[in-house]
Each structure stands twice: as structure tokens, then as C-alpha cells.
Image (cartoon, helix red, strand yellow):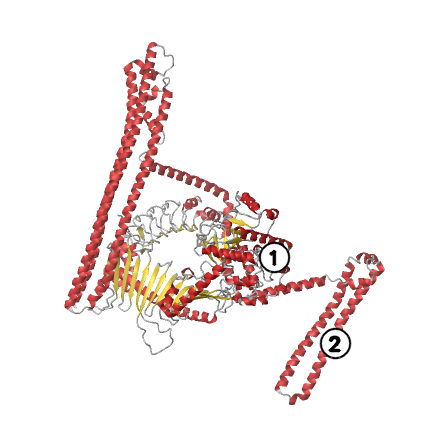
Amino acid sequence: MNRLCNSMEPRVMDDDMLKLAVGEQGPREEAGQLAKQEGILFKDVLSLQLDFQNILRIDNLWQFENLRKLQLDNNLIERIEGLENLTHLVWLDLSFNNIEAIEGLDALVNLEDLSLFNNRITKIDSLDSLVKLQVLSLGNNQIGNMMNIIYLRRFKALRTLSLSGNPIAEAEDYKMFICAYLPDLVYLDFRRIDDHMKELAEMKHQYSIDELKHRENLIQARLEDEQARREELEEHKAAFVEHLNGSFLFDSMYAEDVEGSKLTCLPGVSELLEAYKDKFVIICLNIFEYGLKQQEKRKVELDTFNECIHEAIQENQEQGKHKIAKFEEKHLLSLSAIRDESELTKLEKKIVEYSGDITELFNVLMTLEMQLVEQLEETINMFERNIVDLVGLFIENVQSLMAQCRDLENHHHEKLLEISINTLEKIAKGEFDEDLPDDVRSLFVDKDTIVNAVGASHDIHLLKIDNREDELVTRINSWCTHLVDKIHKDEITRNHKRVKEINQYIDHMQNELDNLECSDLID
Amino acid sequence: MEVLKEKVEEEEAAEREEAAERAERGEKTLRPVEVRREEAPLTQEALRDLEKKLSEILVPGKISISTKDTIDILKLPVSYQTNTPKEEHLLQVADNFSRQYSDLCPDRVPLFLHPVNECGLPKFVSTTLRPTLMPYPELYNWESCAQFVSDFLSMVPLPDPLKPIVQQQEKAPAKKYAIKPPRDLSSKFEQEQEMKQQEQIKAEEERRLREEEERLLEAEKAKIDPLHGLRVHCWVLVLSGKREVPETFFIDPFTARSYSPQDDHFLGIESLWNHKNYWVNMQDCWNCCKDLVFDLGDPVRWEYLLLGTDKPHLSTTEEEDTGMNDDEDLDNLCKDDKDKSFDMPSSWVEQIDISPEAFETRCPNGKKVIQYKRAKLEKWAPYLNSNGLVCRLTTYEDAECTKTLEIKEWYQNREDMLERKQINKVTGLNIDYFKPGHPQALRVHSYKTMQPGMDRVMEFYETARVDGLIKREETPKTMTEYYQGRSDFLSYRHINFGPRVKKLVLNSAESNPRPVVKITEQFSRNPAKPADEDVAERVFLILDERIQLRYHCREDHITASKREFLRRTEVDSKGNKIIMTADMCVSFEVEPMEHTKKLLYQYEAMMQLKNEEKLSRHQAWESELEVLEILKLREEEEEAHTLTISIYDTKRNEKSKEYREAMERVMHEEHLRQVEAQLDYLAPFLAQLPPGEKLTRWQAVRLKDECLSDFKQRLIDKANLIQARFEKETQELQKKQQWYQENQVTLTTEDEDFYLSYCSQAMFRIRILEQRLNRHKELAPLKYLALEEKLYKDPRLVELLKVFA
């Protein structure tokens, strides 16, 4: 911390300064007395005014987490900093300071009104997170490039802007330009923009704005596209069958397979490979479709379960509320009766009666809760069984489909081996007359080499298939376990909360009675 | 309707005997029910029905049947008094048909084919129907049309429901108007039956006299109709098929109610007719009308009178059947063949014409009273009653209609939008219902007395009110208000009042409102706030200075936060005022929060609540004021009971009437002016010349000069006339003045007044005359020049005068 205390001029925002300001700006009169008596916590302060304090550096504000309005104008601030905790801030005044760049505002997502009037800012940027910005005051700064205006187009709520006193305001076209590029703006430099002006500006800059809009739309469309694709992939991932709706797996099999790719140039292999790929992709697609279907089924299962649970809880809550409402009705009467009762024996009797009522209410509520717990447990177990079955079935079927893939691979392997051996024989006999690349020809030196090469390719393929299968099975199993765990945990949390709630309520009731008793006895 | 006019009485008598025999044999008889068949364009049919009835009602009205002589037959159109050759032919055909029918079905009741009309002329039933399209949309659908017909007709029971037969036997020239169902023909057997039943009735009556209680009980239960199966009614039958009529049904023209053919009240159908044809039912009605097939194209089930007219569901067996008929009736073969191409003659009755007034008046004289068992229904035409009353239903406790139970009144066109009034005479509860548009958005007002502060419920059209009030219930000690759609989510406010403090200083009734003891307010959930901060109910116990808050329940909780503030102004040991202590706010929080523990928070919350309490009390006071205001307004409205008149109703709406008349006057004047403009100023002079000849130049010049000199003379005459009148007035005035000066002393004040008013009037007249004269003098030369110019340009003279010039 940079504590410069040597001169009168710059000051540090320390606790004393803040306390003083909070105290001065706090409630008045009776409320003020109370406030003094109790002290005000910084986190309860909603508005803070720190102008003309010669502050050099923003600091020590981290406790003001609920601050809505902060005034730091007419100080010596050079950097915007230390505002990270003030996420509820709506109104920020930093005018008449020495700020050179806009920064450190990323956390202020609720900010609506920002004043940076009379600073040394040259560029408008770093305001991206201020999506609710309505009023922006940047007058008397050093902004010189008109293109800064285009940056402001992203603030859909921006209605008021002041930029006078900047170099750009000197430009002949200044007003027109802003009106044209920020059509939703209502006030510019503290003046309302009239419709005529808007029309003129629009006409003047129509061409370039249209172009800009077109570009913006393109970017927007691309973003949306990407978003859609991402979502689709997420969906597939949720079904555990991502990338199975095409030749992705097949391609990956050959991606690291050097020998396999080499062998494709043998006669007849490319056709064979083509056919193999076709069949393989069809099976992949089958897995994919089946996966999506199963995912849908699991979703429906889960939804039905959730709905059922929700309904049961709701109904139970209604019952509980009803019991409490009935009790409270009686409770009011009992309390007033106890208050009015003067005879000690009767009073005691009434108190006993009333505390009996409280106990009974407790029992009733707890019984309800126990019932619900039992009911839910049963349902949850049933759901668990069902979902495990579903997952099991899915795995089983996927495994059988994967086995088909392996069969295809085996078949392909045999065929390839056959062709390779034939080729080897031909080469050995010197009958092979086609040209082969040298690295391929080098495989055909003897039988072992070629068999090994083909085998290695085969192994890689099988490994890939196995990996994909393993991945799928592992992921769905862990999903299933997590889901079930979460449901159990949620139920336990719910139960704890409810029991705590009931106890709390009963305690409160009992306390109330005790207090009454005490006061009565004292009386 | 007429009774049958039978040519061959003997035949009929025989028939009746046979019918009697058959009945005695205990056969299932065809219950004679005459039903007029109605085809899809039912509006027209019903209107025909209406017209027919109208033609009968208009003259006799509600007066009894004996007033038939009041019909001025001579004023009826010729078609009422004579039969066209075609109609005669049709009657012959009908007779022939009737003969064949009685031959073939001797045991059935004679057909109702050609009753005599008001001029004593037999007319075939089908020709009494004339489809007419009316300009009233209400008459396009059967429900409203039937309702209109039933309103328009007044039911006059026949002296004897089965009597018409006797008349027929007496051969009285059929001039009897039975407008209504209980009408028609039956057999001697039936009369005997009737006699027996009459005896039974008498016996029953005796019994009744003996046991009053039993009689009441009897009356309570559905009595067995002594004339069961003997009545012959005329009903409207609507066949399914056209105009989206899904099922065949009957309409009772007197009650406008519809009945299914399955209804037990319909014992059978004798015949059907519409404006095109006549069908006789050949089906067995042992199971009432339940098994009847309404396929009129099926000649086995429905024997038609005329061939070749519209037959909706003509089936293939039709040809065969006709052939059989021909075989049986050889001598009529040729005739039948001819009949095939014979069309129903066009109707002889006049087109029905309902004036808008008559249509609006609906009932005869605009008023109708229908007596039901223990109830009376009265109907009036709109605007007939000055308070807008159009309908009143009175229900009684006893059959004699002496002890009123409840009165329901319907209103129309009331300016205060009152629609219905319900007065319960037993509980004394009045309920007024309003249509949207009352100045205070009142919807329902139920009360026992108009006195303020008593039991009362007012419901409102909440969307028309700024405060969204739906309902306000009052008892002497409470007021409950229900709200909807408010921005502060208030849904309910209940106010308990204490006993009114008696003040000796009585400023006015309003300045002494009842003291508010307790205010309970409930709010709906405000989704913008967390449940723990969203108040569900707050109770201001004003005397205790206690405020109770109950918050909304969180979604997953069963308990809700509560808070109770107890304001106590106390002083601590040092004599300082205690602003806030922890025991002044008791809270129960579902999720204990830190900031609410602060005294400052509690203090601010309490201060705010105090303010809101003031506001709520003010609201309560305003509500009370509003009730007073509404009551006052209601009383004024009841007093004035103004009716609104649509601006489209040019007959009633005075303003639009005046406007229309003014417009007409303007049009008329415009027309006159145009006619004047077209006046030929040369005509009188041209008339002097021989017609058809071409004008010579000399003649033209003379014509022009004559015309001009004539005009000049007229201008001078006019000037002289004005001058003369002016002088006369002036002289008279001078005379009067002279007379006044001479007799001034002796004049009474009255005479003096008279003189003065005369003077001012005379002066006025003189001034006007003077002005006119001056104007005339100014305009006369201009007018003269204008005419000259016009004459120069006149197409008849222009050639000749040009040459001359």
C-alpha cells in the first residue's frame, strides 16, 4: 500500500476517512441516534460520497459490497482500481480526476450511470461488461478518433452520451456521425436529439451504416452458428455418442496407422477399404441414433421421476402449511387468553395446554416429514433401479454394435492379409508388374514383415474401437453414479433443511410462550 | 285455424265410427297429430306460420273467438275471397286424395286438407304458407324466430279443447278462428272418452273438495292429462339436413321450445305439410314418434299428395308405389298422371309485413303476461315503461299466487346500465346487476337497505377501476375489499370498526366516520422480491399500536417469516426517550438474517409501516366515502331512471330526429332553389309566339326587350311596395305617438307598457323595411344588368342578337 502522507495534498482512503464519510452521510435524527448507538457496517451502506478529498488512489472499498452509488469526483485519482467487490454499483462518478485509461470496471455489471467527465482519456474501451449502461459522460477528455463511437454501438441501453470538449467534438460531422451510428441515443451533450436531426444523419451515413450493419449481422450469424454447433455437440456428448454420426471414428483409426495407409495402394485394397468404411460408418450411425434415442428415454425417465418427487414434496408441504396455519389460528387465541388470564392456576393450566399444542404440532410435522422421507426413498430406489437398467441395456447394445465393428475389422484384416500375401507371392514370383512406392515395396521383403505390418494396422484399429467403447461405457457409468448420488444427497439435504425448519419454528413458538410466562410471572 | 270443411259428411261420419270401433278393439291407434312440416329455410316457414297467425290475430286480437265478425272481409285482397282455377283444381285433387285415403284407411281420422279461411273459402293448407324473408337478423335462426312468434301470439284456449268437432257437425259456416294448437278433429269415440274423463274430473274435483291437502299433493305431482291422446296439435317440424340442422325436432310455436321427436309428449303424426306438398304418415305410431322415419321421399312411409314437387329423399321404390296406386284407382289414372305434373299453386296469402315498431313491440300492445304454476312472467316492449322495465318474473309460494317469494326484473336501455333486479321478498335482499359502463363501474349491488353502514355487497368491473377493486362487502362492523391486478399486489383488505363515537358537535354525517380498530391487508406474491421480504399479510391493530407482518412462504418451506412491531413510547431511567428497543420488534425468520437484527433496520421498517398504516386508514375512510357516494348516486339514478337512446334509433332519438329533419329541410330547399334556377324566364314571352317556328331576328329583339322591360317593371313594383309599407308603418307610428302624447297623463302603466312595446316593434319593422328598400335599390340595377347579360347569352337568342349587335 502506498501511503503518501508527506504533503497536505494527496490523501489516502483509509478507514477513518470512510467511517467519517459513512457517519456523516448516514441517517439523521432518531434513526441517526440509533445508528450511532449501533454503528453502521460498511456492507450496509448503499451510497457513499467522497468528493473533494484529494484522493490519489481508490482503496479500502472492498467491504462496501452493497454499495449502489459511489461519488469519487474532484480527486486526484489516476487509475480506476479497487472496485472489484462493488458488483451492485449502479451509479459511479469519477469526473474531475486524472484518469488516462478506462480499466478496472469489468466487475460492475449493474452499472447504469458512469461519469468520467474531465479526465485524460484518449480511447473508449474496456466497458464490455457494462451491459446495462444508460448514461455515459466522457466530456472534456482527449478522445480524438471518431471510430471510438462505433465501439459504443454494443450498449443497447445507452441513451445519454456526452463527448463535448474532446478533439472529436471539433469535427464538422461530429453530431451527425454520432446520431447516425448511435440511433437509439436520446441525449447528446445534454441536449435532446430531435427527430429531424436523426433523419438527416441517417440519410447522410446510410451507406456506411448499412455496411457496418451487414458486417455486424454476419458476425452475429457466425456466433449463433457456432453456438448452435456447440450446443449440438453438447447434446451428443450428453448422449455419449459424440462424433459417431460420421466417419470420425473410422478416420481416427487410420490417422495413426502408417502401415494401413501404405497398404491401400495394393490392387483391390482401396475398393475393399471403401466398402469397409461404408459398412463401418453405417454401424457408427446406428450407435449414434440409438444413443440419442436412449438419451431421450433417460431424460423422460428422469423428468417423470423429478415431477413425481416434486409433486409429492409439494403436497406434503401443503399439508404442513395447512397444519401450521391451523395451529397459528389457535395460537393467537391462546396467547391472548394467556395474556388476559389473571388467575394463576388457570394460567398454568393454559400454559401447559398450549405447550402441549406445540409439542403436538411438532409431532405432526415430524410425522409428515418422516412419511415423506419414506415415500421418497422408495421412489428414489425405484428410479435408481430403472436408470441402472436403462444404462445397462444401452451399454449392452452399444457393445454388441461395437462387436460388429470389430467383426468388420477382422474381416477386413483377413481380406487385406490375403491380398498382401498374394501380392507377396506375386512379387516373389516376379509376376507383379505394377509400380509400388519404395516404402510399400519394402514391406514385401518376406512374409513375416508383411504379416506384422498388416497385424500392426489391425491392432491399432482394434485399439481405437476398444478405446471408444471404453470411453462410452466409463462415461455413462459415471454419469449414472453421479446422478443417483446427487439425488440421494439432495434428498438428505432436503430432509435436513426441513427438520431444521421445523425445529426452528417450534423453538420460536416455545420461546414465545416462555417469554410470556416470564413476563407474566414477573407481573 | 279452420275446421275441416268436408264435402261428404257421411263419409266422415263413417270414418269416425270406424275409428271408434278400432279404438274399441284396443288397437294401437294412430294418434292424430297434425304437424306442419318445416323445411330447412325455417325462418321463412316460421314466418309463414306467423303470418298466418297474424292475419287472424290482427283483427280479433286477444278478444275471444266470437269477435270474428269484426273482420272486414271486403278489405282483404281478392286472393282471400276467390279461388283461382288452379286452386280449384287443387281442391279437387285434394278431395280426390281424401276420398282415396278414406277408402284405403277407413279407420283413420279424416285429413286436414282444406280449412276455410276468414272469407269462408276453402283453401288448401299448403297454400296458406308463404315463405318470406324478413329484414330482421333475429328471425334468421329458429330460436329467436320462434321466440318472437311465441311472444307475438297470445294464447286463447278454446272453450272446449275438443269442441271443433261439434261445430263441424252443426255445419256451421266455418268462421271460427282457432289460432292455436288445441284444435281439431276427433271422433265420437273420443268424445265419449272425453265425457268419461270429464266425469272422472268431476269425481276428482269432488274428492278435491273433500280433501284440500290431497288436492294440493295431486297438483304437486304431474297430473295425468284427462285428454291424453285426444288433442290434436299443430307443431312446427324442422327436418334435419339443410342449414346445419343436425337432428329433426319439433317447435312449439307458443312457448318457442324445441322438442325431440323422442319426446313422450308426441304421440303420433297424422300428416305433414309445407308450402310445396302434403304428406300423410303411413307409419305406425305405437311407440309415439320415436320410431318414425322422416324420409319424406319414401312413399311407403309418407303418402304424398302431389307428385313432382320437391321430395327431399326420393327413393327408388317410389315409381312402383305410384303404379300400385294407379292400379287400385283406375278411373283416376288419367287424373293422377296429370297430377304428377301439377305444382302447388302459389300462396294466396299476402306477404307478411312486420314493421320495425311491431317487431320491437313484439307482443300485442307491447305487453304480455304469462301465468305459470306459482309464477308469473310479464313482458314489455323496450321503451314502453319509462324505467326501462322489459320483463318481470314473479314467483309465488302458493298456487294461488298471493304470497310473493321473489321478483326478478329485467331492464333495457337504462342510462345507469341497470340490467336486472332481484328482490327476495322473504329475506328482503335486493340484488341489482349492472352491465359494464356504470359511472362507478358497479357490477352487482346486493343490499337490504340503502342506509349506509348496513349489510351490503358491491361488486365492480375491476378493469374499469383504477384501484382494481373487485368486491366490497360491508357489515355494520366490518368492511372487506377484494382487489386484483394492482401494482402493489394488494389483494384483500379487511377493516374492523369500533362503535361510533358519539359526538355532540354534529358537523355532518360524513365527518363522523366509525373508528377503525383493525386493518388486515393481504398481498399476492411479488415475484420481483425474495419471499422473505415480500409481505403476505399485515395487520394493523390500531388501538394496541401493534403491527403484525407475515411474509410469503418460500417455495421449499412450510413456515413463513413473521414480524411483530409494538410501538411503545417510553422513557428510560435518565429521562431520555427510548427510540427503539429489541423487544419492540419480535421476529421469526425462516433463514435468520443479520441485517434485520439491527435496531436501525427495525426502526426504519416500523416508521415505514406507521406511514403505511396512515395510508391504509385513509383508504378505509375513502372507501366509506365512496360507498356513500355510490349510494347517493344510485338513489339519484333510481329517481331519474333515464333511458338511453341509440343514435341510430332515429325515431326515438330527438337529436338525430331533429338533425334528420333539418337535413331533409335543407335538401328540400335546395331542391326548390334548383327548380327556381331552372325556371325559364323566357317562357311567358315565347308562349305568345306561334309554337314550333324559328325565331326571326326581329322577334328575338322584341322578346329580349319585352323580357327586360317586364323585369324592370317588377323591380319598380317591388320597390314601390316596400316604400308603401314603409310609409304606412311610419304613419301609424306617428299616429300612435301623437295619441300617446295626448293621453299620456291618463294612461295606466299597462297601456304604457303596451305602447312602449308597440313602439319598439314598429321601429324594428320600419328599420327592416328601410334596410330592404336600400338593398333593393342597390341590387335592382345589378339584377337588371345580370338579366340582360343572361339574355344575350341565351342559346335561343344568342345567334340572332349577335347578328343584330
Labels 2 and 1 in the same subunit: yes
Separation (CA) of disc 2 from disc 1: 69 Å
Q: Earlier in the sequence, mark 2 or mark 1?
A: 1
Please state the chain letter of the residue tagged with numbered disc 1 in the rendered image.
Answer: B
What's the amino acid at mark 1? Answer: Trp
Q: Quadrant of residue B685?
A: bottom right
Horizontally, is A261 left or right of A354 in the view? Answer: right
Q: Secondary structure at mark 2?
A: helix
Query: 10 Å neighbourhood of mark 1: few (<14), some, or many (≥20)?
Result: many
The x and y percentages for residue A427 are: 34, 12
Name the residue nearer the viewer: B166 or A326. Answer: B166
Q: Quadrant of residue B120?
A: bottom right
**Residue at the far top in the pictured view:** A429
Name the residue nearer the viewer: A225 or B279. Answer: B279
Name the residue nearer the viewer: B333 or A73. Answer: B333
**Circle number at residue B85:** none
Horizontally, is A232 left or right of B386 in the view? Answer: left
What's the amino acid at mark 2? Answer: Ala
The x and y percentages for residue A489 are: 23, 44
Above or below residue B76? Residue A440 is above
Horizontally, is A436 left or right of B333 in the view? Answer: left
The x and y percentages for residue B603 are: 27, 62
- For disc 2, the marked residue is B724
Q: Secondary structure at mark 1?
A: loop
Q: Quadrant of residue B589?
A: bottom left
Please state the chain letter of the residue tagged with numbered disc 2 in the rendered image.
Answer: B
Of the 4 image quadrants, the one containing the C terminus of chain B is bottom right
- For disc 1, the marked residue is B348
Above or below residue B416? Residue A494 is above
- Residue B32 shows in the view: no
Residue at figure coordinates x 24%, y 44% from the top left:
A379
